[in-house]
Image: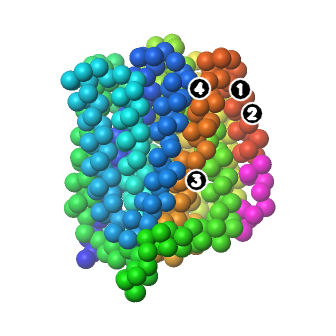
């Protein structure tokens, strides 16, 4: 059944999920730093929260291809809502200790990859139902998610300032409920979101279908190289977002500044994502990837001097602007190079790779901040990030994309 509202409903859940994750991203590290005053513990929390994605994402991809994209998206948002409500319940009946925060954050992290991956996999279904060209749909999808990321930190920082972290968690729970309702109202043809081989013979095991997805990714050498390169970049960048930025702004008691920085990053990503359709028409895939890597790295580098908040915000905007086209570009690459019935599994495996590197980086960066200082650690991290980014941009295999 076609539904002209399908893409709009997908973007409602996409936006509110982005807002929810943006609120949580600023609120959880803030409450840990308030409670413990330790960047190492904030890094440990971020690392442990990343671990479930390594193991959950490949399974999620198989579940999406087996049971359908809408079903997995709704399940993920319901479970994410429950995990956020646990912060409120534990705080109401007892002490919200660091151990409880760890447990709840890790539990929530088990479900977040499912929603994110299912929404990506739903883009072709919703775009087809609504009569939207796929490159344009990819750009709009990632741009709207970035709008959520832009609004989320601002909401989170405002809630912390006005009433404290518990208000931020309450708002997040409401957002996840809204996301669930929006997807439930979508009516799209999701048949190619289920494993075709499973329907044909009725005997394909679940893990055999996962292996098929793994082979589809690794056989495509340029696509696999892209996933590996981004894994390393993610391992270097995520500690900046989850440890260095929160630690710096908490140390100067500036929740508003942290929210403004994340909002500016997201604002840049909004514009960059929406511009993807036009950029894709003007540049080759490999050329656009190189532009993304070089300009985003150059925008992040000056942050190591820990400039005034306004300059953090400006640099963040240009970093987001240059990185914005990457996610829709990656979506388009998968959609054009991978069979529809395998896309859920390929997305899931790529997400698993992205989650693999950040935990180690977050642990190392958190410990380094405590022992060697924030600025020294930031300089080293950005030096390695620049080296990896420019090396990746020069990789010949990307031309084959």
| Residue ID for mark 3 | 353
Q: Residue at x 38, y 34 (%)?
A: 103
Question: Residue 336 appears at what percent x and percent y?
Answer: 55, 72
Classify 10 Å Cα crowding around label 2: few (below 14), some (14-19), many (20 and above): some
- Closest to the camera, between mark 2 and mark 4, is 4
Question: If you read the primary sequence from the N terminus, does the residue marked by circle 3 or circle 2 appear first?
Answer: 3
Q: Identify residue for label 2.
A: 383
As drawn, the label of residue 8 is: none
Where does the image place residue 238, in percent across and percent down from the top left?
57, 38
Q: Which residues are magenta?
A: 391-401
Quarter of the figure with the C terminus: bottom right
CB under 8 Å between discs 2 and 1: yes
What label sits on residue 379 in the rendered view? 1
Q: Nearer the viewer, mark 3 or mark 2?
A: 3
Residue linked to disc 4: 366
Earlier-in-chain disc, 3 versus 1: 3
313, above or below 400, in the image: above
Q: CA distance from mark 1 to mark 4?
A: 14 Å
Q: Residue at x 49, y 60 (%)?
A: 58
């Amino acid at each position: 059944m076609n539904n002209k509202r399908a893409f709009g409903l997908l973007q409602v859940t996409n936006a509110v999920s982005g807002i929810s994750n943006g609120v949580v991203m600023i609120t959880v590290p803030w409450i840990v730093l308030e409670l413990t005053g330790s960047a190492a513990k904030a890094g440990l929390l971020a690392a442990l929260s990343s671990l479930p994605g390594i193991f959950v994402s490949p399974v999620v991809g198989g579940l999406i291809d087996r049971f359908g994209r809408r079903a997995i998206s709704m399940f993920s948002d319901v479970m994410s809502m429950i995990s956020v409500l646990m912060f409120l319940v534990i705080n109401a009946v007892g002490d919200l200790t660091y151990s409880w925060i760890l447990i709840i954050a890790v539990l929530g992290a088990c479900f977040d990859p499912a929603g994110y991956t299912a929404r990506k996999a739903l883009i072709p279904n919703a775009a087809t139902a609504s009569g939207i060209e796929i490159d344009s749909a990819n750009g709009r999808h990632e741009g709207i998610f970035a709008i959520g990321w832009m609004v989320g930190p601002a909401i989170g920082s405002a809630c912390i300032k006005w009433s404290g972290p518990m208000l931020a968690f309450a708002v997040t729970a409401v957002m996840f409920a809204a996301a669930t309702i929006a997807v439930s109202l979508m009516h799209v043809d999701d048949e190619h979101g289920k494993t075709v081989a499973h329907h044909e013979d009725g005997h394909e095991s679940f893990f055999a279908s996962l292996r098929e997805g793994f082979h589809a990714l690794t056989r495509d050498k340029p696509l696999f190289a892209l996933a590996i390169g981004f894994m390393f970049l993610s391992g270097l960048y995520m500690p900046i977002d989850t440890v260095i930025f929160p630690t710096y702004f908490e140390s100067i008691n500036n929740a508003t500044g942290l929210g403004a920085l994340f909002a500016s990053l997201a604002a840049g990503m909004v514009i960059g994502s929406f511009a993807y359709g036009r950029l894709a028409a003007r540049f080759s895939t490999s050329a656009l990837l190189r532009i993304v890597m070089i300009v985003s790295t150059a925008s992040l580098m000056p942050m190591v001097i820990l400039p005034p908040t306004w300059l953090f915000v400006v640099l963040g905007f240009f970093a987001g602007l240059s990185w914005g086209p990457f996610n829709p570009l990656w979506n388009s690459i998968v959609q054009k190079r991978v069979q529809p019935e395998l896309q859920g599994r390929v997305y899931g495996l790529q997400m698993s790779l992205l989650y693999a590197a950040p935990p180690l980086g977050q642990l190392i960066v958190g410990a380094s901040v405590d022992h060697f200082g924030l600025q020294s650690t930031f300089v080293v991290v950005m030096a390695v990030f620049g080296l990896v980014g420019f090396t990746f941009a020069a990789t010949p295999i990307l031309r084959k994309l």
